[in-house]
Image: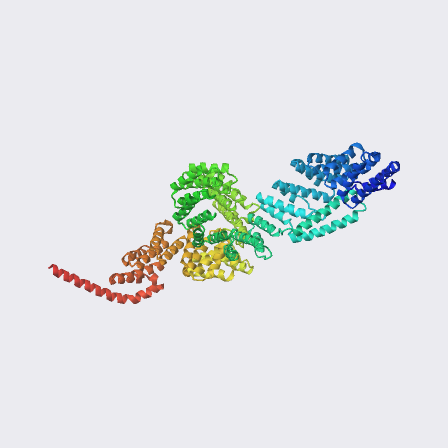
Amino acid sequence: MFALLSRVDSLSLLAMPLLWSRKKLLLTASLAALSSCAFSLLSAQTLQEQVDAAVAAFGEGDYAQAYWTFESIELDYGQEPEFLDPHFQSSVLPVRAYAALMADRPTGALVFFDELLRTHAPRDGVRAFAIYNYAIALSQVDALAAAAEAFRSFQQNFPDSNEAALAKLQEADLLYEIGELERANEQLDLFYESQAPAALRMQARLRALQIASESQDSKRSLKILFGTDWNVAAMPDIAVLSFAALDAGDVLLADGLFLEAIRAYRLTLPRDVLIEKQRERLASTRQNFSQQAAFASSIWKNHSAQVIARLERQLDRLENMDDYTPGLFLRSGQAYLLASRYREAAILFRTIALDTSYTNDIRAEAHYRWIIALNEAEQWEAARSTAEQFLSLHPKHPLANNALFLIARAYQGEGKFYDAIEVLDSLIANFPQDKQAPRWYFTRGYNYSVLEQQAKARENFETALSQYPKSELATQLELWAGLTYFFERNYDESLKRLLDLKKRSQKHPMYPEINYRIANLYYAQRDYENALKTIDYVIKNFSDHTRYGETLALKGDIYMGLGELAQAAVAFRQVPSDEPRIYDYAVFQASKIYKALERYDLMRTHLQSYVDRPDANERPRVSEALYWIGWSLQQEDRAAEAFPLYEEALARFGNDPQARAVSSILSAYADLFKRAQNDADVSFETWLQETGEQSLKDNQLTWFARLTLFTAHRQRRMIDDATADATLLSIHRLVPIEQQDPESLAEVGIVLVERGYESSDDYFEQILNEFPKRFERAAAFYGKAKLAAKNQRLDEARRWLIRFLEETPTHPLAADARLLAADILIRQGVYAAAREALNEILQLKEMRGRPHARALAGLARIETEQDNAKRAIPYWQRIYTLYRAYPEIVVEAYWESAQLFEEIDDPVAARNTLAELLRDDRLKVFPQYAQAEAELPRLEEAARARNALVEQKAAMEQEVKL
């Protein structure tokens, strides 16, 4: 009998993983007392044998066998006094209940634990064990609310125990399972802030993160992920953190929180690294468990055993799962891409695309996104070559057509609109059923629109609408079809179409854009009342739209059109500063208003607030603002205050290639310097020369270039163009391109291209790459067109000129650009278009003078090439009659006119023309002068002969009459 009960005692101790060590002594004493009083009651050897079997099975972890053995004992001896003895039951029930629980018999476990708690009033250690496992059994039969209540009861009954923390975690998880999300989150948050062991606090935080991800709560995911001090050393579940961060990253990415998603993905370890870390963590946890086993309570032993088992399962899954690393990199790359961090995105996608250890599908997907990243970064040439590489590696991939489209986009980005159209032509012709076809039509239409071929653009938009009426691009296609009329200045038709579209698009995302365009149309028609009404509607209802800053600026322009300058200034001042281009425009528009009103005090205050902004050094027009502040002081006869302002501005911005208006500041400074010259120790000329020499000595090469450019401008005005050009070429020799500002790049580049140097293209590339939004890009467009025309790449030259006229039509080189465009058309034999372009120049008042003279020369050449000498001569004659101020054109007009007179057999007019040429001493420096001197004697002879013939003919006619 003693042996039987001692085995029951041993079994009870084994079966209590939640029993505190200090309670074991009390339970042992209790079971010893039970042994002595029950010894005489137990006589059946078969009961002894079955208890031995149950103990052995339990000790070996064979809980199912232990469970069924106890069931057999009850079946055989359930009515026996020995079995029913309360002391015997209080010892057996905890073991039997736990065996049932571990044998996946939670219903039986509930019965036994319930009986133990209701009937036997167990000691604290056993009671704690029973309540905790009773709660686990309830959760296993899906009585989740009751299970949560049981875990809460454990915490209330044993609040000071370390094990209460485990119960709190279990309760929080169950609260989430039964839909009490707010309570679950609150409990997990309180637990993280508690004094619980660090490992459990990390576990709570991980569970909170998992719940936030599962609930698609990006705001909470963000707070947990980045508001937690992840104590990785105290957290065995490093794999859980990795995957929880991965899930959280996906939630953040879906919610448009791209930078936050990037941070989340950074917490996710690549698979190989995670496996190694998991092995290290498993070994460390096992070692800690073995060191603490002698002192830890059974609760913690059980918990540690569960942790080890969980880590083992995680490691096994990691070692046998497909590698998620490429997917992680793709997600991260996409987050970088959407966050406009194109360089990092391209690097990630390229890494995957070129890694042959990944599957072909993964590599192809990464390669395609690599192209997108390069396109978005406006690295057009790299995007095209990468797309071509994609097509060579994956010619039959479903994304092949998309890659071709991206090639077209790259051509478009480079301004190679005809090349883009050619690619789109191929796509549309070969894959008419592709779901992307509407976008191809739209993009081809856009390219035609940029080329000012609005009829063809409209045809593309309308074709797409008729063939794909249910396309998601339908509204956009209709909008652009209407805008083609706007670009043709057919405002009535454009407005009619957009108003009709507006009625049908109230719920479409483009509705604000449609209204904005309608406001622009009213403004173009000078219908300021309707323009103001429309733009106010946009501002009031769509303050979060991407056009918001532009709508406020347009409102300011409308008020200016109405002559309500004060209200215009208010509108401009409301443009948000986080839209730099529009904000800067608005600041200076308001400044112009104050200038017009002669409110120089308001002008200074307004511009000074711009200068004083915390991000002033990042604002490219701060130097310009300083110029106008100084200018306003001069208008109030406060030049003495402007002088130090300009000096400070030149010192601050003179050597900054990004700074604007430095040349204007320098000009104003020169004027002030000259006014004060009587009081100065040196003249401005001396200051200019010495400052230039010092800047070169100090290696302030941007400042040197600006001073040299200023000197060249003075020389062009006071000496001649040749001297000025030679001075500009010293910048080319002494200042690296990357240290030149846009103005010097433009002017030096133009001098080089006019002299035929191919190196000028480096200057134009620098402008387009480093200063793509600056007005000086016009010089790059013109210079590249000039180079292309020189090398017989006439279509390319026309494309650059189209960009010039589209983007920078008011640049001082506009006349040269138009004349070059006409010359190219003449060389291509497109005479009607060339004639139209030249006649348009003659109608522009701002191009009077030399441009008009050159336009007349162009018209004369067209007639000459078409063998219309008699129509060509009057053009040349208009030049040397009306435009004598331009000797280089006048001498050409004389010479060409004389040649044409001789061609139509009028030697007298030819002689008279050359004689008139030779009477102008200004023309002696031109080679035509010497040619005229050589030709004149022959023409004199021919003229005399013609005159004699005329006189003879006249005499004969007179005789006939007589």
- Tell me where residue 909 appears, x and y as whole percent: 26, 61
Pick the quarter of the image with the N terminus: top right
Q: Does residue 195 show up?
A: no
x and y, in percent, of residue 104 in the image: 72, 41
| The C terminus, quarter of image | bottom left
The quadrant holding residue 952 is bottom left
Quarter of image, res 99: top right
Foreground residue among 499 and 312: 312
Total numbered circles:
0
Viewer-proximal residue, 249 or 546?
249
Residue that sits furthest to the left in the current view: 962
Residue extending farthest to the top is 118
Query: Can residue 553 be seen at all in this image of the molecule?
Result: yes
How is the model colour-coded?
Answer: rainbow
Q: Is 110 on the left or on the right of 779, as rendered?
A: right
Looking at the picture, tell me which residue is in the foreground, 114 or 760.
Answer: 114
Between 828 and 125, the one lying in front of the other is 125
Left or right: residue 250 compared with residue 749: right
Return the x and y of residue 392 as percentages of the image width and height. 51, 58
Where residue 483 appears, x then y in whole percent? 42, 44
Question: In the image, what residue occupies the spot 32% across and 66% down?
Answer: 931
Q: Which residue is drawn at 69% across and 35% down?
A: 143
